[in-house]
Image (tube, rainbow, N blue to C red):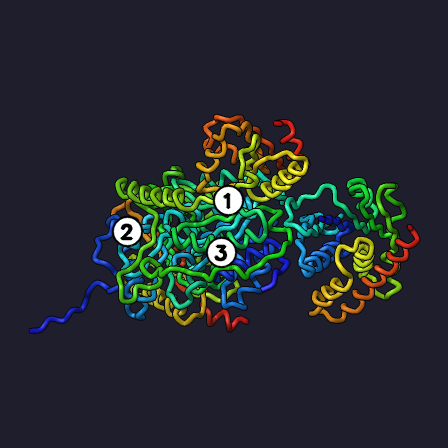
Amino acid sequence: MAKVLLKGCEAIGEAAVRAGALRYFAYPITPQSEVAEYLVRRMPEVGGVFLQAESEVAASNMIFGAASTGERVFTTSSSPGISLMSEALSYIAAAELPCVFVNVVRNGPGLGGILPSQGDYLQATRGGGHGDYKLLVLAPSTVQETVEHIMLAFELADQYRNPIMVMADGLIGQMMEPVDFSAAPKPNPPDKSSWATTGAKGRKPHLIKTLFLSPQLGEEHNRKLAAKYDKMRANEVRYEAYNLDEPRKVVMVAFGTTARVCKTAVDALKKEGIEIGLFRPITLFPYPYKPLRDIAERNEMRHLLVVEMNMGQMIEDVRLATSDRKPITFYGRQGGIVPSPEEVVEEIRKLL
Amino acid sequence: MACKIIFDRPESMTETITHYCPGCTHGVIHRLVAEILDELGLRERAVGVAPVGCSVLAYNYFNCDFLEAAHGRAPAFATGLKRTRPDLIIFTYQGDGDLASIGIAEIIHAANRGEKFTTIFVNNAIYGMTGGQMAPTTLPGQVTTTSPFGRDVANVGYPMRMRELLSALRTPAYIARVAVHTPRHIIEAKKAVRKAFTYQNEGRCFSMVEFLSTCPTNWGMTPVEATQWVQDNMVPYFPLGELKTPEEEQDAD
Amino acid sequence: MQIEVKFAGFGGQGIMSAGKFLAEAGLEEGKEVVWIPSYGPEMRGGTAYCTVVVSEQPIGSPIINNPTHLVVMNRPSLEKFAPTIQPNGIIIINSSLIPITSERTDVTEILIPCNQIAIELNNTRGANMVALGAYVACSKVVSLEVLEKIIRQEFAKKPKFIEGNVAALKRGAEVASQEMEKAK
């Protein structure tokens, strides 16, 4: 199939449909309401369900209920909405139900604004909701990659029985880029009949719950979840090393849209004969600690530059990865301002 | 002489002994729901949604698929379930804190959308599990741990009548209030539960049956005193009966 | 070679769709494209702009502070964005609504009375297509034929708008070509 020009939000909706996720419950919030506007027309064509909930709280709990049937379900929202959904995320993770949440991040805190940001990094990777749970977090940097991540997210959700978050930003949600669906894998959902609550016909009742009043059982459940997160850490780390085939004096670390900006900065400096590396985490949890450590520990590596659309969040993971053995400089923009390649080049020059 | 079984545990209930306090009517209400699931042949398609509150453990007593929602979110949860699998019979089982306080948005919107599930609403005018705090349905002057001088309506407003509130919505629904403090009331209550599940099974409308229930422990009464208190204090403020049926609504249009 | 063009004007002037058609045409020609909008309250009647990047290579940063080209439909947009255009760039000015010029000497500046031309064509809402045609004629970033094909596709569900918009596109291109000749 030929490439089609799609707005990020529309691509998110279409990718989910093609992944076999035919149940969508959501509440409008800028800059991602176009997902709902797309799916309200698309779902009837494929026999799916679209419902505009009364709030993000309700939408996320509809996902909780729908996911218990074993069907592929998802919702989309943006930062303030994700805060409201954090309750359900904690429950769904505890209940071990597969589903996908997409956060088209806007700037905060509070009402903030509707422009792009990466200010939800810590919320996505450290929790947001209560308790010891983890989301597997994918951070695409183009509309095409967003499509691939959405499709991958449903496979991972089923595989791990865990909510997966695709963390885009307002720019990815709003811009249009060519999208190619032809390489999309066929949806491959596993058999879920051993746990799905679909009526106890001819079997013992299934129970999906998160309450463990016994401390022993509560701890056991937490250990089980922790083992699952360890498995993600072992098997699901994804990253891109750009212009890092050889050791570089300065290596940038950036994800999502910001990484894309940094790539342009790398290319611009290359034209001047200056070689800079870029390390782009694709999974924010599990974070690619080891690959980043390996790069940072090369003798030639003098300085790390972390670039984010926030006031310094992923830098905490960069510090964890490198144990502060090499100097780290941070460059961040907020308020919806996307750093330009020129700004990033200037920051690099200061380090050379 | 051959013996004939005239009373038995419904198939829709497990053998587990409930954790409810003596004189609490959750057990009676559980049983009514289970009997109706049996009688209408719905057990194998039934999925219950437990609330947060004393009845969070309801799943231990029902012999059907069950889930546990977040506090107040059972109607949203049930919406997701029912819309995903319209062939299933879904019921939420919610207390007054769950449904009328923290989850009031979810119940109103689910009812207004005409979600085709059944809500069993258990109103005992107090928070049971957390230890006797004031509920949205606590009666004027009623003493609780957070209204130690009696509910002051000038300060916190009047108790909410959920049956009346939801009946104000135009979307067709079945909405009734029943009680279970006497055998006569239990018989009436069962009729309402039967109607509610029948409407759902026919795919007709949202249905809610509000039960006036007891909480002897937190009311500080004996079970007998508690049932009398329901009659003397709750029934006058929370009148019994159907307030909305789908037939009436159609006639009104 | 990478071309970055900013379309700017009032909300309601068809700025976003002009940019989208250009991006579609670039894609049709097998190029890499990105369409980046300004979004939010700005779209509701205030200044609106979008940036389209057309490139032979995969596109890096979608954030373009200094585009190569500019198409402006109202005066505030000219005042705001003209200084940001790269030297040797192109600026298309809707002279029907903009009584001034950029006063830049290092760019090619073409004045097109877009609204007036649209009115002459009896298509008052077609000023954006006039501007788009003019821009493509000047920049040659995509071929006019492919752009026409895209417009026919985009309006397939509203066929009564097709011929008017195609006419506006072509007239814009014609007028711009004449202006280019004069400029030489």
Q: Between marks 2 and 3, how big is the CA–CA gap?
A: 50 Å
Q: Residue at x 76, y 48 (%)?
A: C47
- In the structure shown, which secondary structural element does the residue marked by tag 3 occupy? helix
Q: Quickly name the residue at label 2.
A: B24
Indicate which disc residue A151 carries. Answer: 3
**One can see residue B211 in this view:** yes
**One can see residue B207 in this view:** no
* Rendered location of residue C157, percent (x, y): 69, 69
Q: Between marks 3 and 1, how big is the CA–CA gap?
A: 15 Å
Q: Amino acid at mark 1?
A: Ile
Task: Please state if C126 lies on the left or on the right of A163 as rendered.
Answer: right
- In the structure shown, which secondary structural element does the residue marked by tag 2 occupy? loop
Task: Please state if C115 lies on the left or on the right of B212 as rendered.
Answer: right
Indicate which disc residue A282 carries. Answer: 1
Task: Please state if A67 lies on the left or on the right of A5 as rendered.
Answer: left
Task: Please state if C169 lies on the left or on the right of A288 as rendered.
Answer: right
Q: Amino acid at mark 2?
A: Cys
Which image quadrant is residue A65 in? bottom left
Q: Between marks 1 and 2, how big is the CA–CA gap?
A: 54 Å
* Rendered location of residue A205, percent (x, y): 28, 60
Q: Are marks 3 and 1 on the same chain?
A: yes
Tell me which numbered mark, 3 or 1, is placed earlier along the sequence. Answer: 3
- In the structure shown, which secondary structural element does the residue marked by tag 1 occupy? loop
Which image quadrant is residue C158 in? bottom right
**In terms of depth relative to the viewer, which is nearer, B112 or C84?**
C84
* Rendered location of residue A167, percent (x, y): 53, 46
**In terms of depth relative to the viewer, which is nearer, B227 or A83?**
A83
- Looking at the figure, which quarter contains the C terminus of chain A? top right
Q: Amino acid at mark 3?
A: Met
